[in-house]
Image (cartoon, helix red, strand yellow):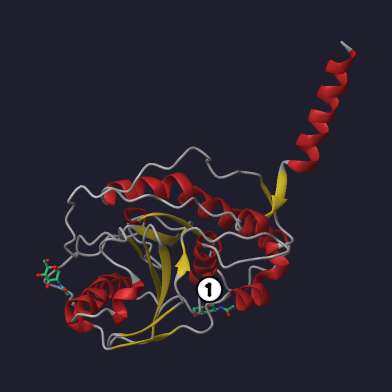
């Protein structure tokens, strides 16, 4: 029986000491590489009578969207707040065959982690009385925010203290399989590539305009690109491409998809800046 008591005591200690992690470590996790299965699926872009590639005028570089800047602004929060440990699922990932499978992988690996990371971050800021001029935001599927003219973005950041029907989507996101969109299309060999590149941007730009949001993103099964809208005339800035599989540690941090989507949440919580 003795070994059992020793074991249970150390297990208890383990729970007390090791179950919690720094928020920074939590956001350094990255999902596994996802295989893509070619089922002859449609590669058509999303089109609409309301937006098109031609809406996008100029695409610049969002210089401030980088790891150094995030750590400068949020280092103390990221290494001050504690969060329950939650390892990434380790089962071999199922392949991407459609938009639906991408959404399901997004739910499995990222969605609730972004939400939990934001909740813990805002709790910590609240306890320190340093929320400043922010609204606490959460994250989830697009129709958790207001629907404008039946357009529903895939994801939303939204104020938690307003009803769904009135809260704007403070940073709409779009999920696209990588066989439909990639940031490389920008310098693609054909004009069609370059047009497809802008077509997807025009879709998110349209959502952002509907909600008067400054920020947005496109996430594929390969990369995340954060978007900043500069005006109402199709001038955008894009972050560098952040690999889906990026992961790091507290001592060797990387700009991961989780950290980037958490940071977009923090940007969207800023009452003075989220809207344009
Ligand atoms: C989107 O896909 C459709 C169908 O393949 C194509 O006709 C159209 O040119 C594409 N749009 C852009 C902007 O490339
Ligand atoms: C917070 O931001 C809003 C939106 O810009 C502004 O109207 C308000 O005056 C700001 N409040 C403070 C205390 O700065």
Q: How many marks?
A: 1
> Residue 236's image quarter?
bottom left
Q: Tell me which residue sits at (61%, 58%) in the image.
A: 28
Crowding at label 1, few (<14), some or many (≥20) Cα neighbours within 10 Å? some
Q: On the rendered structure, is 63 left or right of 70?
A: left
| Disc 1: which residue | 270
Looking at the picture, does residue 126 appear above or below residue 31? below
Looking at the picture, does residue 66 appear above or below residue 234? above
Within 8 Å: ligand 2 and the Cβ of disc 1?
A: no
Q: Tell me which residue sits at (32%, 61%) in the image.
A: 178
Q: Nearer the viewer, residue 127 or 107?
A: 107
Seen from this angle, which residue lies furthest left? 49
Residue 103, position in %: x, y?
34, 49
Seen from this angle, which residue lies furthest top? 1
Q: On the rendered structure, is 140 left or right of 29?
A: left
Residue 226, position in %: x, y?
43, 72
Q: On the rendered structure, is 165 left or right of 40?
A: right
Q: On the rendered structure, is 84 left or right of 183?
A: right
> Residue 122's image quarter?
bottom right
Residue 19, position in %: x, y?
72, 41
Q: Secondary structure at mark 1?
A: loop
Q: Nearer the viewer, residue 5 or 235?
A: 5
Q: Tell me which residue sits at (25%, 75%) in the image.
A: 202
Residue 163, position in %: x, y?
39, 55
Quadrant occupied by the N terminus: top right
Q: Tell me which residue sits at (54%, 68%) in the image.
A: 263
């Amino acid at each position: 029986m003795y070994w059992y008591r020793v074991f249970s005591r150390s297990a208890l200690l383990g729970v007390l000491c090791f179950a919690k992690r720094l928020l920074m470590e939590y956001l350094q996790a990255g999902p596994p590489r996802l295989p893509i299965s070619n089922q002859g699926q449609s590669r058509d872009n999303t089109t609409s009578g309301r937006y098109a590639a031609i809406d996008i005028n100029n695409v610049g570089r969002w210089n401030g969207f980088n790891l150094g800047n995030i750590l400068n602004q949020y280092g103390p929060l990221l290494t001050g707040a504690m969060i329950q440990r939650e390892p990434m699922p380790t089962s071999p990932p199922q392949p991407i065959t459609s938009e639906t499978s991408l959404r399901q992988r997004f739910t499995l690996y990222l969605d609730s982690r972004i939400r939990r990371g934001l909740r813990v971050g805002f709790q910590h800021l609240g306890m320190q009385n340093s929320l400043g001029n922010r609204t606490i935001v959460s994250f989830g599927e697009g129709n958790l925010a207001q629907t404008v003219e039946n357009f529903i973005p895939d994801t939303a950041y939204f104020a938690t203290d307003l009803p769904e029907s009135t809260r704007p989507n403070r940073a709409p996101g779009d999920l696209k399989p990588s066989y439909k969109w990639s940031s490389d299309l920008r310098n693609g060999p054909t004009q069609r590539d370059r047009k497809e590149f802008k077509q997807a941007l025009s879709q998110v730009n349209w959502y952002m305009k509907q909600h008067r949001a400054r920020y947005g993103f496109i996430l594929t099964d390969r990369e995340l690109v954060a978007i900043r809208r500069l005006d109402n005339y199709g001038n955008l800035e894009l972050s560098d491409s952040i690999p889906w599989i990026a992961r790091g540690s507290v001592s060797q941090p990387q700009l991961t998809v989780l950290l980037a989507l958490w940071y977009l949440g923090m940007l969207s919580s800023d009452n003075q800046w989220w809207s344009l």
